């Protein structure tokens, strides 16, 4: 039966429309909320609105193809391996596969591309080690995150084999991370990398890693006799968010000890990169001027006024104190350009309006291929040559992999054009509620929206809370987790209650992150106490609540939330004096839902026990 192009389009349209609307549902609230806050509360227009709108459309289309590609291509391969590998292979081979799977899945995560570009606005003189990790050692940074996830997946599989309690892995892990955090907090060189390391834990648990490692975990549980266990598959996501933190902290300590970061004797970084970063902003010696271009000079000749972009410097002359004033006779007046210290999320080349669209697509395609192709090859070779399994529905899987590649390519472009400028624009303008700012992409200075800075900071925190709350409820993975938890607890922990608990925790975490920047509070003071409290909650909670409680943090860091919140954080950090970066919000957004879920879980467990006692007494 032959179909015309029109008939084919008519058949496929409902299929693609449904998937497209699913992605729109996951991002519409965030976009509308951010735009409404900037226009209605801050009273500022959206700069580059047309470009942002196109970018958001491209993000939705890219995610549609990417998620469908995962369903058709990567997930079937992962599920087959998860079912066959534990049955046909020895434990060392399974652990090796689990490690490589974790590394490959991390590189394929859409949000990892945001991490690669997050260092463009860090000044080397303010945070030399952080600058070097994000620029000179960016490849090592991503690799260390991948190694951390790989170790976590291998350990999670080993846990299923031996039936270890998740508590016995979480408690020592959190104690080690808390100790390292406090140790590095008191050193001014290592302190700035703490927020980056803790944020890396949130970046890893996305739409690629979670389904693949869960498929492997469930397969292992079935083979070792715990396939019907209530906790089958849980726990790996938790470990995959903790181990990357440790890996990044250790990477930072290694380079700190090697003295090979920016400004140190063994520094071998690219001089061009360092100069490009420090040139317009001033070098490490404290130069706070930038070069005035010929175009800017002509603008000054046409309108010779010194505005807030210039510093007035007097050279020479004869100063005299007269009638309470300094009188300077015959000086040379020099106007020096004040550098723009605003961090940016993407490189200048991605913002170049003259850049060819073909070059943009080529770069995005290369990045997508680097992320997807190695993981696909690894899964295919494992099935074909190690497990010797015949791959069924090869044509469908091939189409899925094509969708995943194309979707990732479009997603990367949409991030650069839509989510990044929207997030950084909002983040840069949010401090306008409590401080004088130069609005993102504009000229001039806007005075604080509220006379009381504390009032303005509270308003900014309230904005952040509802952003996190609404964005979390829109995450499709949270809905799936709610169904699973309600089934596991036999209806005791309702799906709606879990979703509200997680969303409230994320909202509180993001609000705390904004207050951290507004008041310039060290991250260790906000992160270590909650995690120590979590150790107590973990110890007194049942195993099933610990498993899905800790895993609940993984559903809060989707492909939309991570780049948007990271961009917003860097934007806020750019306009708050004393803040050198915008990391840390994701880390606080991850710890919040674990606390709320475990706390509500304790209440649910107590109510359940009371009802059982009453039922026994009545009988």
Image: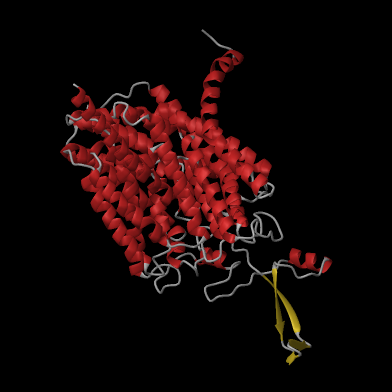
Residue 343 position (above or below residue 4): below
Between residue 112 and residue 473, name the one nearer to us: 473
- Residue 157 x/y as whole percent: 23, 39
* Residue 185 placement: quadrant: bottom left
- Image quadrant occupied by the C terminus: top left
- Residue 294 x/y as whole percent: 74, 66
- Residue 297 x/y as whole percent: 76, 68
* Residue 382 placement: quadrant: top left
> Which residue is most to the front?
618
In the rendered structure, the answer to whether residue 430 lies left or right of residue 149 reads right
In the rendered structure, the answer to whether residue 63 lies left or right of residue 53 reads left
In the rendered structure, the answer to whether residue 529 lies left or right of residue 450 reads left
> Colour mode?
secondary structure
Q: Is residue 429 visible?
A: yes
- Residue 508 x/y as whole percent: 45, 47
Residue 159 position (above or below residue 72): below
Q: Is residue 345 visible?
A: no
Query: What residue do we see at 50% from left, 39% from top?
Result: 471
* Residue 613 placement: quadrant: top left
Report the label total: 0
Residue 527 position (above or below residue 306): above
């Amino acid at each position: 039966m032959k179909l015309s192009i029109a008939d084919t389009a008519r058949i496929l349209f409902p299929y693609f429309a449904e998937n497209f609307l699913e992605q729109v549902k996951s991002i519409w609230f965030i976009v509308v909320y951010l735009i409404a806050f900037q226009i209605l509360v801050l009273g500022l227009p959206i700069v580059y609105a047309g470009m942002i709108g196109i970018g958001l459309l491209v993000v939705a289309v890219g995610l549609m193809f990417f998620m469908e590609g995962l369903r058709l291509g990567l997930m079937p391969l992962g599920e087959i391996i998860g079912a066959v590998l534990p049955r046909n292979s020895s434990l060392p081979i399974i652990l090796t596969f689990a490690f490589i799977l974790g590394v490959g899945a991390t590189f394929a995560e859409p949000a990892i591309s945001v991490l690669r570009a997050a260092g463009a606005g860090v000044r080397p003189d303010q945070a030399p080690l952080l600058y070097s990790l994000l620029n000179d050692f960016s490849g090592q940074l991503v690799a260390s995150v991948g190694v951390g996830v790989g170790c976590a997946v291998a350990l999670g599989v080993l846990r299923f084999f031996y039936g270890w309690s998740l508590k016995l892995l979480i408690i020592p892990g959190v104690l080690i991370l808390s100790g390292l955090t406090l140790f590095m907090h008191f050193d001014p060189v290592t302190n700035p990398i703490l927020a980056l390391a803790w944020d890396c834990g949130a970046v890893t648990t996305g739409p690629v890693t979670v389904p693949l490692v869960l498929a492997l975990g469930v397969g292992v549980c079935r083979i070792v006799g715990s396939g019907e266990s209530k906790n089958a598959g849980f726990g790996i996501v938790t470990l995959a968010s903790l181990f990357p933190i440790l890996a990044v902290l250790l990477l930072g300590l290694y380079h700190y000890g090697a003295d090979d970061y920016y400004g140190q004797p063994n520094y071998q970084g690219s001089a061009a990169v360092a100069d490009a970063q420090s040139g317009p902003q001033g070098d490490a010696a404290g130069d706070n001027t930038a070069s005035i271009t010929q175009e800017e000079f002509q603008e000054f000749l046409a309108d010779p006024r010194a505005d807030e972009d210039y510093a007035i410097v007097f050279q020479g002359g004869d100063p005299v104190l007269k009638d309470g004033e300094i009188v300077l006779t015959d000086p040379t007046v020099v106007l020096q350009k004040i550098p723009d210290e605003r961090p940016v999320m993407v490189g200048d080349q991605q913002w170049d309006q003259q850049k060819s669209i073909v070059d943009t697509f080529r770069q995005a395609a290369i990045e997508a291929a680097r992320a997807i192709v190695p993981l696909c090859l690894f899964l295919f070779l494992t099935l074909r040559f190690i497990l010797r399994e015949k791959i069924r529905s090869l044509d469908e899987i091939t189409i899925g992999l094509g969708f995943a590649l194309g979707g990732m390519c479009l997603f990367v472009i949409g991030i650069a054009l839509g989510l990044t400028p929207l997030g950084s624009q909002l983040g840069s303008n949010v401090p306008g509620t409590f401080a004088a700012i130069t609005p993102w992409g504009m000229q001039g200075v806007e005075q604080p929206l509220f006379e009381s800075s504390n009032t303005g900071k509270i308003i900014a925190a309230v904005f952040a809370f509802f952003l996190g709350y609404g964005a979390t409820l829109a995450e499709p993975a949270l809905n799936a987790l709610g169904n699973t938890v309600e089934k596991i607890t036999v209806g005791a922990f309702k799906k709606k209650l879990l979703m509200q608990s997680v969303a409230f925790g994320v909202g509180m975490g993001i609000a705390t992150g904004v207050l951290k920047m507004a008041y310039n509070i060290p991250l260790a003071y906000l992160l270590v106490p909650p995690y120590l409290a979590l150790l107590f909650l973990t110890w007194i909670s049942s195993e099933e609540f610990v498993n899905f409680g800790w895993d609940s943090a993984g559903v809060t860091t989707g492909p939309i939330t991570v780049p948007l919140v990271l961009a917003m954080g860097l934007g806020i950090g750019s306009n708050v004096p004393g803040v050198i970066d915008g990391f840390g919000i994701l880390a606080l957004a991850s710890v919040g839902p674990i606390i709320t879920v475990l706390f509500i879980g304790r209440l649910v467990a107590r109510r359940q026990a009371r009802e059982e006692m009453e039922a026994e007494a009545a009988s």
